[in-house]
Image: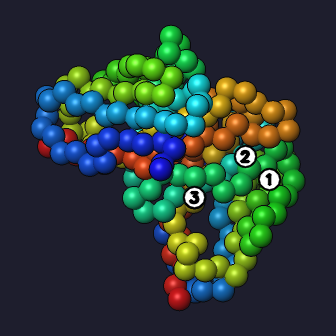
C-alpha cells in the first residue's frame, strides 16, 4: 500500500464551482502536508503546506488536515480555468526532511 | 531566468544507449534531488544529495547513477537505457537551513521528457 493515496481523477468542473481534492495517508509519522500544483509541461510548484492538523487558507484555496482520520484535503473556491492543472498531495515527517511522499496527483479541468 | 534548469527538455533514445540528464540551479541551495514521474505512479525519488560529497540513493535508484559536479550542478545518468525508464524526470532543490516555523520547500525544474525505444 502506497503511504499517500490520491484519486487520480480526472476531475472536470464548471467555472465558479467549489472543488474538493482529497488524499489519505497511512504513516503516523507524517507531520507536514503539502499541495503542489503542476501545469502541463511544467514542474510541480508548492501551493500550500500545513503543519499537523488544522486548516490553512490562502485566497481561494484552503488546505485541511485531519490527523485522526489521516485525511488531507484541498478546497478551491470560485474555480477558474487557470486552476486547470494536476494537483499533487505530499507528506513529510519533518520540516527539513528530504523525503517527500507524493500522491499520484489529480488532474483538474475547469471548464469556462 | 529560471532558478532550476534542466537539459535536455526532451530526449528520444534507443535501448542500451547511455544518457545523461543535467540540472543546474541558481538558488544557492545545498540539497538537490532527482525524481521520475510516471502516469499512475506519481513522483518517486531516484537520488538525493545534501552537498557535493554526500550522495544517497532514493526509492528507485537501480539503473541510475548521479554526479554532483558542484553545489549548483547535479547530473543523472542512465548507463544503459531500457524502455521502462521512459518517464518525466525532474530535478529539485531545497535549502539546508530550516526555520522551525516553516516548511523546507522543494523547488522543481521544468522536467525532461525521456523516451527509450
Tag 1–tag 2 contact (CB < 8 Å): yes
Mark 1 crowdedness (10 Å alpha carbons): few <14, some 14-19, many ≥20: many
Chain assignment, label 1? A
**Percent x, y for residue A87?**
57, 60
Which residue appears at 53% of the width and 52% of the height?
A44
**Mark pair 3, 2: CA separation:** 14 Å
Left/right placement of residue B62 relative to residue A50 reads left
First of labels 1, 2 by sequence position: 2
Q: Secondary structure at mark 2?
A: strand
* Along the viewing direction, whichever of B98 and A81 lies nearer the viewer: B98
Residue that badge 1 annotates:
A65
Which residue appears at 51% of the width and 44% of the height?
B3
> Within the image, what quadrant is residue B13 found in?
top left
Do discs 1 and 2 share a chain? yes
Q: Secondary structure at mark 1?
A: strand
Tell me if I can see residue B44 in this picture: no
In front: label 3 or label 2: 3
> Within the image, what quadrant is residue A6 found in?
bottom right
**Percent x, y for residue A101?**
60, 39
Q: Secondary structure at mark 3?
A: strand
**Percent x, y for residue B79?**
23, 23
**Mark pair 1, 2: CA separation:** 8 Å
- The label shown at residue A37 is 3
Residue that badge 2 annotates:
A33
Chain assignment, label 2? A
Q: Is residue A86 above or below residue B24?
A: below
Amino acid at each position: 500500500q502506497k503511504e499517500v493515496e490520491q484519486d487520480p481523477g480526472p476531475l472536470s468542473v464548471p467555472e465558479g464551482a467549489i472543488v474538493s481534492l482529497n488524499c489519505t495517508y497511512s504513516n503516523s509519522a507524517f507531520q507536514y502536508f503539502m499541495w503542489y500544483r503542476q501545469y502541463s509541461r511544467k514542474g510541480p510548484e508548492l501551493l500550500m503546506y500545513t503543519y499537523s492538523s488544522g486548516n490553512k487558507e490562502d485566497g481561494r484555496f484552503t488546505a485541511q488536515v485531519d490527523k485522526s482520520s489521516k485525511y488531507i484535503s484541498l478546497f478551491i473556491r470560485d474555480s477558474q480555468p487557470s486552476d486547470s492543472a494536476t494537483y499533487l498531495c505530499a507528506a513529510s515527517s519533518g520540516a527539513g526532511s528530504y523525503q517527500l511522499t507524493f500522491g499520484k496527483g489529480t488532474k483538474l479541468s475547469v471548464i469556462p | 531566468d529560471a532558478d532550476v534548469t534542466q537539459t535536455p527538455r526532451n530526449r528520444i533514445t534507443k535501448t542500451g544507449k547511455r544518457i545523461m540528464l543535467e540540472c543546474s540551479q541558481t538558488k544557492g541551495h545545498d540539497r538537490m534531488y532527482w525524481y521520475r514521474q510516471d502516469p499512475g505512479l506519481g513522483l518517486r525519488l531516484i537520488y538525493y544529495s545534501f552537498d557535493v560529497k554526500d550522495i544517497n540513493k532514493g526509492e528507485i535508484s537501480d539503473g541510475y547513477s548521479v554526479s554532483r559536479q558542484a553545489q549548483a550542478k547535479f547530473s543523472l545518468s542512465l548507463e544503459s537505457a531500457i524502455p521502462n525508464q521512459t518517464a518525466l524526470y525532474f530535478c529539485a532543490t531545497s535549502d539546508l537551513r530550516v526555520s522551525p516555523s516553516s516548511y523546507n520547500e522543494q523547488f522543481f525544474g521544468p522536467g525532461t521528457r525521456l523516451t527509450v525505444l
